[in-house]
Image: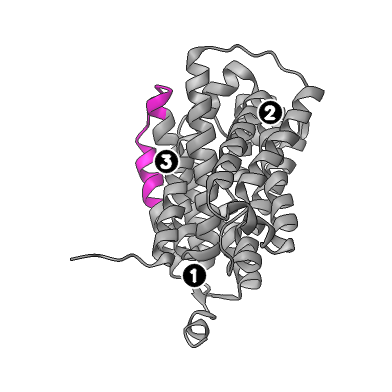
Amino acid sequence: MKISISQENLNTIFGILAILFWGTTIAFSRSLTEQLGPLTAASWIYMLSGIWGCIYLINKPGGIKKIFQLPILYLIGCGTLFIFYMVCLYLAVGLAFSREQVIEVSIINYLWPGLTLIFSLPILHKKGKIILIPGIIIAFAGFYLATVQSGMFSWEVFKGNFQVSYFPYLLAFMAAITWGLYSNLVRRWAGHTEGGAVPLFLLATGLVLTTIRFVFPEESYWTPQVIVELLYMSVFPTFLAYTFWDRAMRKGKIILVVSFSYFTPLLSIVISSLYLQVAVKANLWIACGLVIAGAVICKFSIIDKTQKESTFK
């Protein structure tokens, strides 16, 4: 018996795969950053992923032609948001002056799943229930516990770091807002189209980061391990993950995929603990329960008012 999967379900699966790939980002990025520097690692990752993507477009029948058929709002608007997000995120990490501030920057960046759900209300005309608020709070409580499982974070340290250097926090918050907007606007501006421009977005991001790297040079140490990690990062968590996410946001079940995205920081910590050989404490499992509970509540607190209308079109 042949089992068929609808395009919507297939694109939803792609979105979940993107989340799984992103779960490996912290572990490999941490290793690459320690050897190459944050800007050098990021520029190489996005430049290579953009090259792989462009090669894919050139070899795909009608790939280049479909790019020129995409809405101009999607190409310029979403492209700008994509580049801005990547630059803000990597600058936030690179400019953080201590390990504690890097953790805090990561917490602020992971506001984007909740912001994506919130932005879906005005942008995609979703309808939210009041339980969305406690759902987001519970999920972020899980983020907090999962991220601070090493015991390095405290509000006293946060206040002290903010007084010393607030710019990384601002960049991380801007990144979270930008990705929340991007995830909704790709659906609104290009949800009806075939194909996407993520390869071009990746290449443009690599060019921008390379330019910044020349302005702020870093000392790098190249090894066979660096090359392997760089190839992995450029293909799976970057080229494939962002391409899959773009498809999921345009033609998948956006609320379901975004709800699953709450698992991203949890996956990052689990995979990082294994790859970087960091011990995992018991409160990580408590965080897991909070993340799951918050994701389920958020999933069922958003109603798509246009779903019934679209079935009659």
- What's the magenta region? 273-290
The amino acid sitting under disc 2 is Gly
Q: Residue at x 61, y 76 (%)?
A: 125
x and y percentages locating residue 85 in the rendered image: 68, 45
Which of the two residues, 204 or 135, is positioned nearer the viewer here? 204
Q: Which mark is residue 267?
A: 3
Q: Is residue 139 left or right of residue 54?
A: left
Q: Which mark is residue 131?
A: 1
Q: Is residue 131 left or right of residue 159?
A: left
Quarter holding the N terminus?
Answer: bottom left
The amino acid sitting under disc 3 is Leu
Q: In what element is the residue under mark 1? A: loop
Q: Specify the principal SS of the magenta part.
A: helix
For the residue carrying disc 3, how many other residues have a C-alpha within 10 Å: few (<14), some (14-19), or many (20+)? many
Would residue 289 be counted in the magenta stretch?
A: yes
Would residue 221 be counted in the magenta stretch?
A: no
The amino acid sitting under disc 1 is Ile
Q: Residue at x 37, y 27 (%)?
A: 274
x and y percentages locating residue 175 in the rendered image: 68, 46
Q: Residues at badges 2 and 3 in contact (C-beta under 8 Å)?
A: no
Label 2 to label 3: alpha-carbon separation: 22 Å
For the residue carrying disc 1, how many other residues have a C-alpha within 10 Å: few (<14), some (14-19), or many (20+)? some
State whether residue 147 appears in this view. Answer: no
Q: Is residue 185 left or right of residue 16?
A: right
Q: Earlier in the sequence, mark 3 or mark 1?
A: 1
Name the residue that disc number 2 marks. 94
- The quadrant holding residue 202 is top right
- The quadrant holding residue 50 is top right
Q: Earlier in the sequence, mark 2 or mark 3?
A: 2
Q: Residue at x 42, y 48 (%)?
A: 17
Q: Residue at x 66, y 32 (%)?
A: 93
